[in-house]
Image: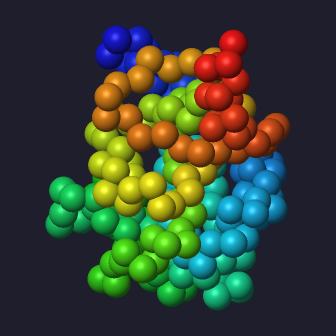
Amino acid sequence: MEEIRNALRRAARSRRSTLAPQTRICWSRSIQAKVLDRPQYLAATSIALYSPVDNEVETRAIMDHAFRHQKKVFFPKLSGSEFPIFVRVFSDGDFIAGRYGIPEPSGEVRLTDANCESLAVMIPGLVFDGRGYRLGRGGGWYDRALQGLGHRVVCLGLAYEFQVVDRLPEQAWDQKVQYVITESRVIDCDETAQSEVSR
């Protein structure tokens, strides 16, 4: 199973690496616009984003919108901790170069249980399926992070349409997202899973 998962990762990473800048920008704008229209995002008082690398879907427009609407904004912080944490940022200047060169928060204000009561988490990935399963880079960071957040939060996977497959081979520790948002559509993963069960 892991060979299949790794092959899917390699194929998605390879295709994503060849995206033209104009295409990435256009698709990212479309995906972010869909996020900003989602009732799950609009109702959230706190959001967690990520700093895109390797042609991942951009999140800047979501961050800017969240700041304008007084939402609390959190980003992953890896430096100095193996345990997944999200730390609050108050402006686009609150970042430093973290592990692997990925920008991360410079501050120390962590996500709290109270924040999780109304939290929308945007999640990157290499491959998603319609049921909400995802393949990341293979380190399991987001799986551990989401497990720690529990079922109180809504998780939105951001991906390009070519990163969505019919079905991924899942592992017991995989954490699902409730929605996958691409430049072409919004997939309600709970709805997809229920339709599979009813077949």
Instruction: List x then y, in percent, for residue 192.
Output: 68, 29
Where residue 88 appears, as percent x and y from the top left, is 43, 79
Image location of residue 24, percent across then percent down: 71, 44
Q: Residue at x 61, y 20 (%)?
A: 197
Q: Is residue 13 left or right of residue 95?
A: right
How many numbered marks, from 0 up? 0
Please tell me whether residue 63 is drawn above or below residue 54 in the rendered image. below
Q: Residue furthest front?
A: 198
Can residue 60 be seen at all in this image of the molecule? yes
> Is residue 79 depicted above or below 30 in this figure?
below
- Residue 164 percent location from the top left of the image: 64, 27
Describe the colour scheme in one phrase: rainbow
The residue shown at (49%, 34%) is 134
The N terminus - image quarter: top left
In this view, the residue in front, 103 or 89, is 89
Name the residue at 42% across, 80% down: 114
Residue 51 visible from this viewpoint: no
In-image side of 15 versus 87 (left or right): right
Placement of 146 over or under 91, stated as above or below: above
For residue 9, what is the image quadrant? Answer: top left
Left or right, 1 with respect to 20, comes to left
Quadrant into which the C terminus falls: top right
In this orientation, which residue lies closer to the viewer: 117 or 37?
117
Front position in the image: 105 or 24 = 105
Q: Residue at x 38, y 19 (%)?
A: 6
